[in-house]
Structures are given as C-alpha cells and as structure tokens.
C-alpha cells in the first residue's frame, strides 16, 4: 500500500469573538493490490485555544454513483467521544473499521475490490473549536494474465504492397488497463517502416480490462528468420512491471531468385546403364516445382515424377549434355535457372585382330591387336590360361611353337571407373608336322623276363597326328591308352618281355612324321644279385649259425652236468625251438657227434627257395619270434 500526503487547512468563523482553526492532513493517494486491506489515515490538529475541545465528531464519506448515474456523497462511518457507528446498507458495511486516536483517525478497508477505487472523505468537527475535511484517492491494482501471442497460420507474401497481419497479442483480466508493446528480434519495430498496431480494449462486467493488439508489418525475405514477441506492461503499487510473451517465427513467402542443379545419384562418375538423378533446388518459399530441359532442346520439357528431381534411367552416351531447370512460377524465364554438365562415360566391346581364330605355321611370327573405344583412359592386359603374357593393345608372338597354341584374352579396364571393363579373345592354332614330347629320341630300358613294361608316346601337331607302333621281339602287346585333345595325341602300349624288345612310335600327319624308339633289354632273375653280394650273405649266415650252435651246446653241457638230461643209446637228440611252427618260424636241426657239431640246413617253413639275403632276413625274424 502506497500513501501520498496532502495537507488541508480550513479557517472557520465561530460565534465567539475569537477565530478558531483546524488543520487536517491526509494522503493524496493510497495504492493497494486487489483483495488486500487498505488503511487510510486522517490526522487533525486544533490550533487556537488553550485546551482541546471536549467534543469532537468524526465522519467518513465516499462518493458513489446513483442509479440515475449521478454522483452523491454517502456516509459510511460516524463517531464521537461516546459512540462509534458503521453505517448500514453501504458497500462497506461489515468491511471497514475505524480506529480513533489522539488527533488521528484511521479507516481500514478489508478485502479491497475493484469498485473501491474512489475518493474517501474524512470530516472532523470540533464545534466551536472549528471543523475541517480532507480526502484520499484509493487506487486498486490487479496484474493481468501473461500475454498470449499467436502468429498468422498462413504464409505472408513479401510482394504485398500494404502491411500484412503478422501476429496478435492479448493480455487479459488486468486493472487498470495494461499496455502492449511489440518486439522484432528483441527490438521494437520501427513504426515508420510500414508497421501498424491495432489495439482493442474491452472491460468485463467484473471491471477487469482485456487488451488485444494486432501487429501489421510489411515483411521482407530477411523476416523468415526473425523472432516476434509482445510485452505487456501494467501498474502495481509504487511501480510498473512487464511480462514478455514467447517468441514466434512467421512464414514468409518470397519468389525464387536463385536455382541450383546438381547430380544427386550415383556418386562419382556416370557410366552407361546407370540410373541418374538430377536434383533442382531454389531459394524461394514455398519451394517451387521445376521444369527440366536440355540446353540443346529448350522447347522440350523432360518428364519428371518428382517436383524437384529428374530421373534418367538407363542412361547412354547420348544423354550427355547440359541440363537446365527453372521454377514454374518464375517471371523471368531466362534468368532464374540452374544448369549442369552431365557426362555419361562408356566403353565399347573389345575388338581383337585377328578375329576369333588364326592359323599360323610353326616358327612364324604373329602380331595381335586389341582395341576398345572409351571416353576414359584404358589399360589392356593379355592373358593365356590365367597367366599374364602381355601389356598394351598389341601382342607379339614370335617363332611359334606348339606351346603357342591356345586362347589369348585381352582384358580392357578403366582405372578411374572400375565398373567399366570388357574383353576379347583370339584362338591361335600352330600348324606343323608331329613333334614328340620329350627330349630323348631313343629310350633304353631293362626289365625282367616275364614282366610287363608300358611304353608311352605323346605327339603334338596340327592337323592332329596319328600314332602307330612297330614292336619287334614280342608278340604279346596291346594298346592300353589312346586319347586326344585339341592338339596332342597320347598312346600307351603294354608289352610282355620275353626277350629283348625293340619298339618304335610313329607320329604322322599331313605335314610330316616323327619317330621315337624304345629298346628293352630282358634280364633273368639269377643275374639280379651279384657274386659279391652272395658271398657276403653266406658269411653272415655261417657266423650266426656258429653263434647259435655255441649257445645251444653250452646249455646242453650245463644240463648234462646237473643230471637233467640222461644220455640215450641212439646218440642223436632233436631240439625244436617251438612246438608249433608258423610261416615265419625258423627250424634248426642239430646232429651231435663226439668230435664236432655241424649245422646242416636253414630252411623256411613254407618251403620256398630264398636267396641268401632272404634267408638271412628269415633267420633274424625267427630269432625275434
């Protein structure tokens, strides 16, 4: 509650010979919030006379409006030294209280309402001592609700010649009337720059004020990023307060002044067969639709299923060129456009010379070429049987042999665009007489009599050679393998050796003949072991037999001394190393004489005749068993 003082001095005439005077002091204004309690003091002083009068009458009045609309004073309180009375049937019956004090009276109003904003009068009457009257204006304040801002739901065109409505702001239920101020980017807009502010004030039946303000503004393209807000200011006891609304953006419509066209897909270089997407974008709002053309055919519009994307699929080298796009709503058809150069790269099929296949004579030279037309730099590599045999578009084949025969493939690639690649091939056939595989023109062999030997012969040549055999020394032979491929004939014969054999392989075609000779020497089984080897084996057998006989003799002598073995009449004892023999067992038969012992036979159980080396092996095996 805020108070403003005002002094009132009244000079009155009494019926005595001396003049009496009353000084009365009141606040000019008292301020209070709605619903709170207000206190209005009234101070007075009697200036003449030695003593204060014995009777002082105090009354409080208000100015009210009658049903006819006229203003009239109405008493709300009366008091003197003997009684204090609050008048009935007034707006303040039951809501006020007057506190008397020496030379002061104080009016208290509880639960202040809006209609309490009026003038309150204090009247002091001391009869002969004089009387006086003063007044205080009670002001009531109710802050409004927070402001609510709303932008226009549709876009605002910057081409409008007059200011357009941008937003509205409303502050409700305030007292006294609040004020609204607009801000653009936290700064009040220049009212001289095409700005209109329309204000609508309404007072409710309850006495509250609502204020609605509308901002009209001639927008520009820069306002698409501007922030608009409003601020409500209102009075409170002893101050002015403000509350700011939220900020909003507005949608500004402006024409397209710049257009950009670029390749959206695919990434990187474009090759034939790709699906190409060209995207067009302008700076207008709302984003316009576009039409697409080629610079070579400006009068032909290219079909597009999308407002801002042109799809070309699949593309070929004919689609290369300059493409343009223009907004449909452009006023200047020539100026507002976007354009770009589209290059579709290609690689034609490889052309190999000679074509398909080439026949050349053995010993000749040949030059093959491989070329493929391309929009980019190419690399050519030659392969045969998966192995690289050359680089570049030219392949030189010198002094042709049958190994030169085969398929030669040229691979053409584009390093800057690996997806582009092609290949071509040529089949080289070397023509000539037969050539037998192998460096030996005569093959010498040895084989045991009765065994079978295989003789192999392989011949190259074109036309494909045929192979025939001429065998002397054996009538028992037959061809076991006969196969051919592109330029090789292979034959294998099996010959049973009964005596020395001489064989010849004859390979022939229209270009000539080649012969390969075989010599097979028949050997018998007795010649398979040399005399030196036989003597060594016999010595080993004799030594081992003597060692075994010595061991057995010692055992028999020891048993005889112990009486374990009685002497028989025959003078002959047979000892077997095992009761039962098997195929790999060794049987030793001993004959005893008084002077010496002699081993007569080492023989395998199965009765097969073995050579000295085999007998030693069986002997060792019997000992281990």
Image (cartoon, helix red, strand yellow):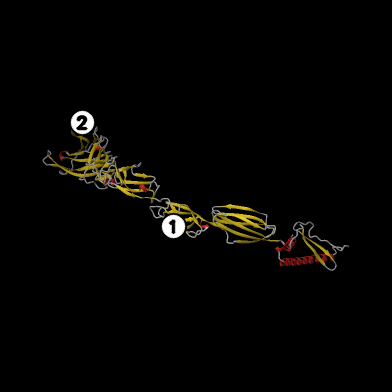
- Residue 508 seen in the figure: yes
User: In the image, is 300 to the left or to the right of 472?
Assistant: left
Nearer-N-terminus badge (2/1): 2
Residue 298, percent from left and from top:
30, 44
Q: Classify residue 440 by image quadrant.
A: bottom right
Which residue, given by chain and number where applicable, does mark 2 sit on? 67
Mark 1 element type: strand
Q: For this rendering, which residue is in front, 142 or 22?
A: 142
Q: For this rendering, which residue is in front, 414 or 481?
A: 481
User: In the image, is 581 to the left or to the right of 297?
Assistant: right
Q: CA distance from mark 2 to mark 1?
A: 120 Å
Residue 465, percent from left and from top:
56, 54
Q: Classify residue 6 by image quadrant.
A: top left
Q: Characterize the local packing of mark 1: few (<14), some (14-19) or many (20 or more) Cα atoms within 10 angstroms.
A: some
Q: For this rendering, which residue is in front, 120 or 256?
A: 256
Mark 2 element type: loop
Q: Residue 394: which disc? A: 1
Residue 474, percent from left and from top:
67, 57
The quadrant of the image that shows the C terminus is: bottom right
In this view, which residue lies farthest toward the top? 68
The quadrant of the image that shows the N terminus is: top left
């Amino acid at each position: 509650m805020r108070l403003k003082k005002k002094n009132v001095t009244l000079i009155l005439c009494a019926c005595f010979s001396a003049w009496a005077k009353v000084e009365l002091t009141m606040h000019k204004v008292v301020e209070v919030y709605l619903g709170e309690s207000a206190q209005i003091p009234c101070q007075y002083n009697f200036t003449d006379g030695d003593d204060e009068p014995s009777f002082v009458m105090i009354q409080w009045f208000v100015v009210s409006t009658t049903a006819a609309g006229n203003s009239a004073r109405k008493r709300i309180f009366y008091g003197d030294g003997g009684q204090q009375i609050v008048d009935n049937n007034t707006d303040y019956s039951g809501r006020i209280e007057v506190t008397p004090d020496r030379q002061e009276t104080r009016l208290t109003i509880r639960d202040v309402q809006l209609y309490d904003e009026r003038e309150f009068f204090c009247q002091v009457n001391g009869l002969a001592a004089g009387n006086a009257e003063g007044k205080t204006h009670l002001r009531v304040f109710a802050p409004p609700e927070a402001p609510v801002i709303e932008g226009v739901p549709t876009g605002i065109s910057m081409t409008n010649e007059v200011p357009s409505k941008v937003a509205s702001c409303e502050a409700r239920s305030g007292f006294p009337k609040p004020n609204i101020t607009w801000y653009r980017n936290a700064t009040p807009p220049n009212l001289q720059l095409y700005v209109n502010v329309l204000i609508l004030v309404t007072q409710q039946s309850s006495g509250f004020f609502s204020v609605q303000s509308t901002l009209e503004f001639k927008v520009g393209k820069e306002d698409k990023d501007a922030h608009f807000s409003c601020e409500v200011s209102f009075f409170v006891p002893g101050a002015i307060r403000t509350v700011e609304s939220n900020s909003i953006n507005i949608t500004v419509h402006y024409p397209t002044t710049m257009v950009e066209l670029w390749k959206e897909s695919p990434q990187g270089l474009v090759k034939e067969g790709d699906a190409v997407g060209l995207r067009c974008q302008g700076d207008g709002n709302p984003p316009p639709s576009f039409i697409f053309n080629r610079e070579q055919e400006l009068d032909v519009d290219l079909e597009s299923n999308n407002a801002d994307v042109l799809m070309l699929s699949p593309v070929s080298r004919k689609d290369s060129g300059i493409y343009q796009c223009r907004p449909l709503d452009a006023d200047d058809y020539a100026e507002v456009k976007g354009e770009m150069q589209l290059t579709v790269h290609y690689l034609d099929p490889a052309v190999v010379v000679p074509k398909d296949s080439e026949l050349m004579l053995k010993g000749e030279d040949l030059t093959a070429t491989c070329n493929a037309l391309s929009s980019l730099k190419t690399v050519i590599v030659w392969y045969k049987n998966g192995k690289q045999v050359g680089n570049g578009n030219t392949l030189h084949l010198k002094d042709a042999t049958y190994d030169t025969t085969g398929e030669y493939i040229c691979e053409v690639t584009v390093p800057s665009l690996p997806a582009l690649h092609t290949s071509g091939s040529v089949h080289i056939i070397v023509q000539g007489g037969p050539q037998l595989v192998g460096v030996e023109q005569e093959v010498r062999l040895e084989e045991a009599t009765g065994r079978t030997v295989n003789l192999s012969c392989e011949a190259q040549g074109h036309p494909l050679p045929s192979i025939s055999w001429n065998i002397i020394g054996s009538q028992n032979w037959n061809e076991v393998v006969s196969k051919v491929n592109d330029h090789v004939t292979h034959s294998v014969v099996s010959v049973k050796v009964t005596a020395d054999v001489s064989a010849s392989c004859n390979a022939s075609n229209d270009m000539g003949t080649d012969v390969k000779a075989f010599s097979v020497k028949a050997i018998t089984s007795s010649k398979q072991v040399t005399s030196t080897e036989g003597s060594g084996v016999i010595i080993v057998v004799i030594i081992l037999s003597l060692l075994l006989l010595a061991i057995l003799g010692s055992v028999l002598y020891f048993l005889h001394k112990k009486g374990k073995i009685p002497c028989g009449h025959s003078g002959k004892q047979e000892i077997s190393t095992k009761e039962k023999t098997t195929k790999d067992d060794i049987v030793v038969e001993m004959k005893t004489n008084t002077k010496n012992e002699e081993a007569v036979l080492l023989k395998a159980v199965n009765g097969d005749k073995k050579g000295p080396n085999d007998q030693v092996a069986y002997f060792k095996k019997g000992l281990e068993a």
